[in-house]
Every structure is written in C-alpha cells, then in structure tokens.
Amino acid sequence: MEGASVSSLCSHFLSSALSKIPYPQKAHPPFSGPFHGSIPIARISTYFPVGSPGPRKKSNDNTVNTEISPHRAGIVSAVRLLRIDQGGAFADLLNEKGRNSAKNEMGYVERTLGFRTRDLDDRDIRLVTEIVGGTVRWRRYLDHLIMSLCKEEGMFRSMEPLLLQVLRIGFYEIIKLEMPPYAVVDENVKLAKRALRPGAGNLVNGILRKLLSLKDTDSLPLPKVVGDDRSQARALAIIHSHPVVPFELSTYLKDFVRLQTGMQTVIQSGLLKEGICSVQDESAGLVVSVVDPQPGDTIIDCCAAPGGKTLFMASRLRGQGMILAIDINKGRLRILKETSRLHNVHNVVTTTNADLRLYAEMHNIQFDKVLLDVPCSGLGVLSKRADLRWNRRFEDFEQLKNLQDELLNAASMLVKPGGVLVYSTCSIDHHENEGRVAAFLLRHPEFAVNSVDGYVPPEFVSEEGYYFSNPVKHCIDGSFAARLVKTSSYTS
C-alpha cells in the first residue's frame, strides 16, 4: 500500500513503545499520599511472550487466584493490550455481547501469566472494553507522560511490555477516566506484583504517585505547540494522540494527501477504523471528479464494492442526496456498508446485493448520475497487483469485453434523460476503454460523449474528451473514464 494517497488525513505519527521492563532494587510502600521522592533505578528482567508462561508453572488444577480476581478487568486488559501490540488481537473484539470472547480472554491470561481469575461479569466486560479502547486511542499521549516521569528515557525504552501496559492502564484511568486515585494505584500495584513480581509493583506505585502529584498541581509535562510546522505537528500529535507521518499534498485533488511511507503507521493508529480518513489511489479520486457528485444528486454505483469511490462520492454530497451501491459480492458489500457508518455517510448510502443486469431489468428507476466501474483486466494497477501479470489469459480479455458490454447496456437503462453515465476501468487497454465506449455509442445513439475537460486537470484529458491516467507519465495508477450524457430530446 506504500505510495497510496490518503483522503482527508488530519494528523500524524504513531509512537511505538515496546520493550523490556525495569526491576527495582528497592521496595517502596503502597500508595499513602503525595509522592515527593525520585523513581527508583531498576535493572532489566526477562519477558516471556504472550502464550508462554515463561518461568511460571501453570497450575495443573486450574486454581482460581482469589487475590488478583478483584482486579480481573485490569489483568485481562493488560494481557489484551499486549496481544494488540504484538499483532494478535483487535481493540474492539471484546464487547458487551461477547461472552465467549470473555472466556477466551481468560484463557489468554492463564497461558500468559500461569494463573486465572474468576470469570468476567457484565460490568467487567464493559470496563475492559473501555480500558482497552481508550488506552489504544490515547497511547501516544500516555506514553509521553510515562516517559516524562521515568528517571531516564532509556528506562522507558527498555521497559518490559506487560509492565508498560499496566502503567498505560493506570495513567488512562487517572487522566481520562478520572477514577478514584487511591483505587487506581492500589489495584495496579497489586496487579503488577502478582502478574510480574513485587519490585514491578513498587515501580508502578512510584510512577503513579508522581503522576498524581503533577495532576493535583496542574503541571503535567505536556509539549508546547511552538516552533516550525513540523514541531507544532509533533506537539499536537502527542496532545491529541495521533500519528505523524510524512506526506505531501496531492497536485491533482484537494481532498487528498500522498504518502510514500508510513501507511502501516496510519493503519495501526486506528485512523481508518475511526473513519477519519480512507486510502485510495488518486486515479480513483479523479474518476469521482468525472462523475462530479453534487448535493441533492441521486447516484447509483453499479459495481460498488469495496466502496472507495462510493464513500468519496458520498462525502461530496454533504448529507444531501442519495447513493445506491450495488454489487454482486455480498461479503464485500457488507464491508462497504460498515465503512459508510464509520465515515458517517450511511445516511446517504444504501446498499443492494444484486447482479446489475438483472436489477436493471426488474426495476423501473432512473438516476441523475450512474457510475459503472466495470470488472477489467487491471492492467493499470500492475504495480500493486503483480499477480495479474501471470494470471491473465487471452480468453479472459474476450470474456471481460463481453461482460463490460452487458453491464454498459444495463447501466444505460438507469440513467435519467439529461443524466450522466460514467464508464470507468483501471485498465490502460484501448479495447477495454475507448473500444467499449465506441461500441456502446453505436448501440445507444441516445448517448453522447461529454468531455471531461473542466472536471479533471488538463493533462488527463484525451483527444476524444475522455479521462486517462498513465502510470509512467502521471505516477499514479492507470485508469480510464468516459462521461456520457443521455440526450433528453432523442427519439428512436
């Protein structure tokens, strides 16, 4: 996905803090008031990854640890956060309906730490969901505070993953949930002592007490938004807990920025899942420019899934109008529907699982604008789909051209008099592009070419008035689009 464009990207760099944890040499008493001392120097111990209890012997009788059971939501959250960091879980898998998920999580706790607690009740499940989701959301902000309160930066960098999760949880509960301080300190200290060792609990105690002292005096160590644009962006990224990735503005589309690196950072930060931005090539965005969605339009996207163009068109409607997204693939269409909710455009997007050819015959309905992004050879996206180089046969092209003709005929039935039909591909093959349009116009003289000049930058306008992007010339995916208008005065 490197080199793709991100539409409406609004923030920056995801911090990554995974490592090993200090083992304090000197014990400190449990929390009993404001903290005025320094955080103890620590030595490193060995961490055993999720799924391996390490030196701890797993109980053969599955005995429930009653000491840690009152803090079971915290220990489940810590182990789940470990798994998320190591790529083994998603933040939203555990939810109020997930009773089986709750049992699975307890299994992970036992395999990781060598003991189990009492099962989670409904209140615990809700609390785990809040702690895990919130800690992931605010991780960069929390890590900045934790690192600031460590005696040395190296102490944070070398911190053992499980202890880091316990600290993140404690900081989140104090700063964002504003839970009673004494309860947060007590529970997380006990959690660290039992899940790791007594010295780990002492370290948690010291750092959380220092946090409370700073919070009470309103002197949390937050960065100042000063300096050049990069410095200000990094400060804002910490304060609002968003990733910072290098980008450049698209020269073709005002809603797009271009990323050469850092796509995994964007994905891991949750920006896509939160609907803050989406990922697609600029060539796809330029096809939407050819459609030219306007507030109040009725639009049908005939081969919509997975929905990148649908969502971009929906954002152009500004909440006014309607898009019917049709696709023959039910699973991919379901993803489109879910994504439209994330992007808060579900009020203008309706999905229908159907074969376009049958749908057009069975429904007497017409739209202002029809987008037909047909199945094609994909010759314009070989840089991203290297498998296509070896999986295409000559017979495939003939079958695809026949399918494209059938879909064009069906889509033409859905266009209002005076309406627009946009035929598009991600191919650079003349026969799939200009050839199909020419054949269609012979069959349907009620349609005429409307030049895309004025809808896309001049360098993308062909002599015939079509949109065409060349991967070599424009450094984006190869694609094609023809804007066809149905004449309202035509009589056969």
Image: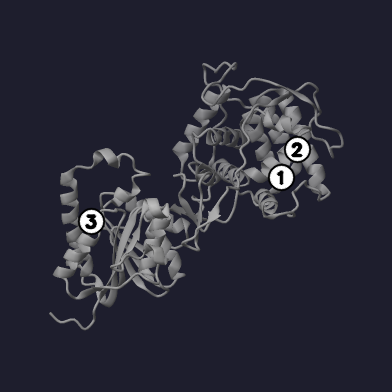
- Residue 413 placement: quadrant: bottom left
Rendered position, 261 above or below 161: below
User: Closer to the camera, 219 or 455?
Assistant: 455
Q: Nearer the viewer, mark 2 or mark 3?
A: 3
The residue positioned 49% from the left and 50% from the top of the image is 272
Disc 2 residue type (three-letter):
Leu
Q: Of the two numbered discs 2 and 3 on the same chain, state the one appearing first in sequence.
A: 2
Cα gap from disc 2 to disc 1, whole angstroms = 9 Å
State which quarter of the image contains the C terminus.
bottom left
**Residue 80: percent from the left, percent from the top?**
55, 35
Quarter of the image for residue 308 reads bottom left
> Around disc 2, counting alpha carbons within 10 Å, would you say few (fewer than 14), some (14 to 19), or many (20 or more)?
many
Q: What element carries label 3?
A: loop
Name of the residue lying farthest toward the left: 492
Picture coordinates of residue 436, whole percent (x, y): 20, 61
Residue 477 can be seen, yes or no: no
Residue 101 sits above or below residue 464 on the image:
above
The answer to whether the residue labelled 1 contacts the one labelled 3, judged by CB atoms less than 8 Å apart, is no
Query: Which mark, by number, is residue 174?
Result: 1
Query: Where does label 3 land, which residue?
Result: 432
Amino acid type assigned to the residue bearing label 3 in the image = Glu
Q: Which residue is drawn at 51% across and 29% down?
A: 108
410 and 341: which is toward the camera: 410
Asked if the residue at tag 1 contacts the one at tag 2, i.e. Cβ–Cβ closer than 8 Å, the answer is yes
Which mark, residue 260? none
Relative side of 296 to 199, left or right: left
Distance CA(mark 1)–CA(mark 3): 60 Å
Earlier residue among tags 2 and 1? 1
Residue that mark 2 sits on: 208
